[in-house]
Amino acid sequence: MVTERISSVDVLDVRFPTSRHRDGSDAMNPFPDYSAAYVVLHTTAGSQGHGLVFTVGRGTEIQVAAVRSLATMVTGRAVDELVADPGGLARQLIGDSQIRWLGPEKGVVHMAAGGLVNAVWDLAARRAGRPLWQLLAGLSPEALVAQIDFRYLRDALTEDEALQLLRTGAAGRPERERLLLDEGYPAYTTTPGWLGYDDAKLERLCVEAVEAGYQLIKLKVGGNLADDVRRMGIARRAVGPAIRIAVDANQIWGVPDAIRWMRELRGFDPYWIEEPTSPDDVLGHAAVRRALAPIKVATGEHVHNAVMFKQLLQAGAVDVVQIDACRVGGVNENLAILLLAAKFGVPVCPHAGGVGLCELVQHLALFDYAAVSGTTENRFIEYVDHLHEHFTDPVRIRGGRYAAPTAPGMSAEMVPASLAAYRFPDGPAWAIGEAA
């Protein structure tokens, strides 16, 4: 019998010129070009696994190079071995001593490992004929715990505690899976809130969001205080008092500025302030939270590993954990973060948007509801209406909720025509000479 192996790994630089219309614009990123280092695993039997690492334009070539540097540890591996234990691969990729020196467990090299790990999980789910969220939910607590590296986490979460959380979460799982398939998972939308949009567009998109069924919208803040006061007023009048409005500063402030600025916006009843300061400043987030309560503090899209999430939770620095499918070391590390959040009783509202983030992270949130937290109370997945048409299994929103994906895999596969058109720098979308 011939053993199926990984025959090659393709890594593509794919960029979308979203800066031309200010889509995705915020206080820290005024002109982003949503991009990805796109990963495809090929096997000797003709199967594929897809993953990506989200970026915002220049520098994607660095991310591509990092994935390629790690891909040699995947090529030639037996597929059965990989899909049976993605955690083993994750530990090898993250633990390589020479590459690890460039992190460790953070930044470009850590995200590169995550892109490859996610591609393996996509391959595993495809081989199982199930969407990733159901594949994960169907694993035993013991199998899930075996996928997690607890080395730096045991002072906050032990293997036994994780097993207990998962065993408790298993009760009622079939019914919750049915509810997900029937009703979906709550979403919130950032589509109205980009800083580059004019007031009329902001108002129109806020009204449309409420009409579409969203109970929470998000606005970007931090460019100019007077502008933020005006824009918050427009949004609050447009959606009324019952709809939650979250705000996102994208790390633009120091701690005193965050407190001062948000006190000026308090009258508009903001639900949370997201990334109020440096994502590495655990004690700064704790200080902001104490000063602004009951406004919630949310963060996570730039938190680079489970250790940082552990500290944020231990310090009582966050009210909302925002996991990202492409920031940390892949599915395995996100499993650890979901369990840490469950241990500390903090809701998870994943970060999404960009290129493929909605497609990927929905699987983690659905798994969390089905097999860990067992609730969607005060939990939402971010949704941004950008670039979904470039995926073969794009997210579907119905009545302000994510429809549960049913196709096998992690929903990461991109349309071949889109890869050809937006490949950087020689795709037709970039042939006009505009650099990312």
Image (spheres, helix red, strand yellow):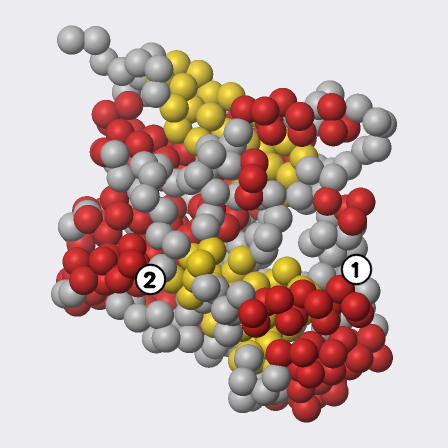
In the picture as drawn, the residue positioned furthest to the top comes out as 1
- Where residue 116 appears, as percent x and y from the top left, is 44, 33
Q: Between residues 144 and 211, which one lies in front from this camera angle?
A: 211
Q: Which of the 4 image quadrants contains residue 416?
A: top right
- Where residue 45 appears, as percent x and y from the top left, is 30, 14
Q: Is residue 315 visible?
A: no
Label disc, if present, on residue 183 of the rendered structure: 2
Residue drawn at x 24%, y 27% is 81
Q: Identify residue type, mark 1.
A: Gly
Residue drawn at x 51%, y 21% is 10
**Residue underneath mark 1:** 196
Residue drawn at x 67%, y 35% is 15
Position of 376 compared to 355: left or right? left
- Under circle 2, the secondary element is helix
Q: Between residues 109 and 167, which one lies in front from this camera angle?
A: 167
Say which label, 2 or 1, has the lower sequence index. Answer: 2
Q: Is residue 433 above or below residue 381?
A: above
Q: Which of the 4 image quadrants contains residue 306?
A: bottom left
Q: Is residue 295 above or below residue 124?
A: below
Q: In which quadrant will I find the C terminus?
A: top right
Q: Identify residue type, mark 2.
A: Glu
Number of marks drawn: 2
Q: Is residue 389 visible?
A: yes
Dot 2 alpha-carbon crowd within 10 angstroms: few under 14, some 14 to 19, many 20 or more: some
- Where residue 168 appears, as percent x and y from the top left, is 17, 67
Position of 416 compared to 125: left or right? right
Label disc, if present, on residue 218 of the rendered structure: none
Residue drawn at x 59%, y 53% is 385
- Where residue 309 appears, as percent x and y from the top left, is 46, 63
Q: Is residue 269 above or below residue 390?
A: below
